[in-house]
Image (cartoon, rainbow, N blue to C red):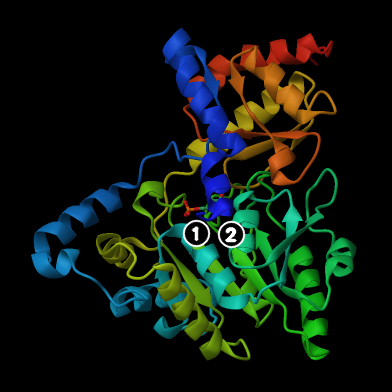
Amino acid sequence: MINQKSVQLGSVRSVIRELFEYGKKRKAQIGEENVFDFSLGNPSVPAPAAVQSALKDIISSCDPVELNGYTSAQGDLEVRKAVADYINKNFSVGISADNIYMTCGAAASLCIILNALLNKGDEVITIAPYFPEYRVFTEHAGGKLVPVAGKEGTFQPDIPSIMAAITPATKAVLINSPNNPSGVVYSEEAIKEICKVLQEFKERGQTIYLISDEPYRELVFGGVNVPYIMNYYAESIVCYSFSKSLSLPGERIGYIAVNPAAQNAGEVYAAVCGAGRALGYVCAPSLFQKLIARVIGTTSDVSVYERNRDVLSAALASYGYEVVRPDGAFYLFVKSLEPDSDAFAERAKQHELLIVSAKSFGVEGYVRISYCVSPQMIERSLPAFEALAKSYGIKSA
Ligand code: PLP
């Protein structure tokens, strides 16, 4: 018999993918412009012009064999140096190329780091709402995901809940800010408090790693600061991806950065290389590694997302929805108009609104709206959101 866990994982689509597939069918039936598909987190803004021109330049100037050849398993040295220089310029953490491992995006970064750190039965605490794949990645690495609720309404980390969830088996705390699905940016105060707790455990002899999953770091609005965890806690690792910041989700490029200040940074990095090897995640796409060395620091035009956020959150609030104000990413977290968010998301379909129930993100009573869509679609969708609220007897302000 083949591996039944894998069969099951491969046979059941995620709620998000299910909704996206439904949307494709519905668009074919009633026309693309009549379906308001807020299901996926696929960037709607093109990659910056600098990406196009750097790619053209690399293709025309690079030796053709080198262009498409393997790099070192952990990534090209010059590329890793460029990434380290960028991190040092912005966050002054004294990181070097030997702390950087190039990966196929954040998903690969997470799988590698979890396989690098976890022994069978180790626990990973995360804060709900959280990216549903965390459970898949953690369990595949032999661990157990332990979600703890964020603070109701703000979805900031709740320190007493995190403390209560720590056991002798806790190996890591996994955070994601700006957050998918809430769009919330964790405050510096919350980060400091988490790090203080972890430092106390470290001093008592239990090292708990802090993993920060950061595909949305640059997608912030109004100058909000996203604290860089290496500046707060030595035993920390950043899982980064260019999927959203450069609108390159299909190109599969990102990196893992191990804090050089970690007590056993060399061993952690060796484990990252070992896990990358065992999983077959070696030599991230070499053309896109070369691209990153040239364009790191460039970001897609996030003003489009900011405008979408402003228009959608103001309109929904005026129709009577309770909206969690997001400072980043491209997701709006909205309170469901009935206790069962699955039923609410289902009812939204009657208005051709495709929004994701937050149950799979570990939270009851909310839905996620991905507003990485065209501003025109946002405008067209507003009467449908208003009609949905009215169908629950809620009057516009
Ligand atoms: N982590 C979070 C929170 C995400 O939202 C995503 C993708 O949407 C990922 C990781 C995976 O990112 P990537 O496409 O870079 O693998």
Name the residue at the front extreme: 1
Quarter-of-image position of residue 388: top right
Q: Is residue 203 above or below residue 311?
A: below
Work out whether residue 285 or residue 18 is closer to the camera in this orientation and state it.
Answer: 18
* Three-letter amino acid code at the position of disc 1: Ala
Quarter-of-image position of residue 346: top right
Helix or strand or loop: what does disc 2 sit on? helix
The residue shown at (77%, 10%) is: 390
The residue shown at (80%, 47%) is: 154
Q: Is ligand 1 closer than 8 angstroms to the Cβ of mark 1?
A: yes
Which residue does the numbered mark 1 point to in the structure image? 106
* Three-letter amino acid code at the position of disc 2: Phe
Quarter-of-image position of residue 333: top right
Tell me if 120 is positioned left or right of 44 in this view.
right
Q: Residues within 10 Å of mark 2 (few under 14, many from 20)?
A: many
Q: Position of residue 126 (x, y in %)?
A: 72, 60
Work out whether residue 226 or residue 239 is closer to the camera in this orientation and state it.
Answer: 239
Q: Quadrant of the C terminus?
A: top right
Tell me if 69 is positioned left or right of 104 in this view.
left
The residue shown at (50%, 71%) is: 90
Q: Residues within 10 Å of mark 1 (few under 14, many from 20)?
A: many
Which residue does the numbered mark 2 point to in the structure image? 137
**What label sits on residue 321 in the rendered view?**
none
Q: Is residue 361 above or below residue 86?
A: above
Tell me if 372 is positioned left or right of 191 in this view.
left
The residue shown at (45%, 40%) is: 43
**Is the residue under label 2 in contact with that under label 1 (CB below 8 Å)?**
no
Which of the marked residues, 1 or 2, is nearer the chain's N terminus? 1
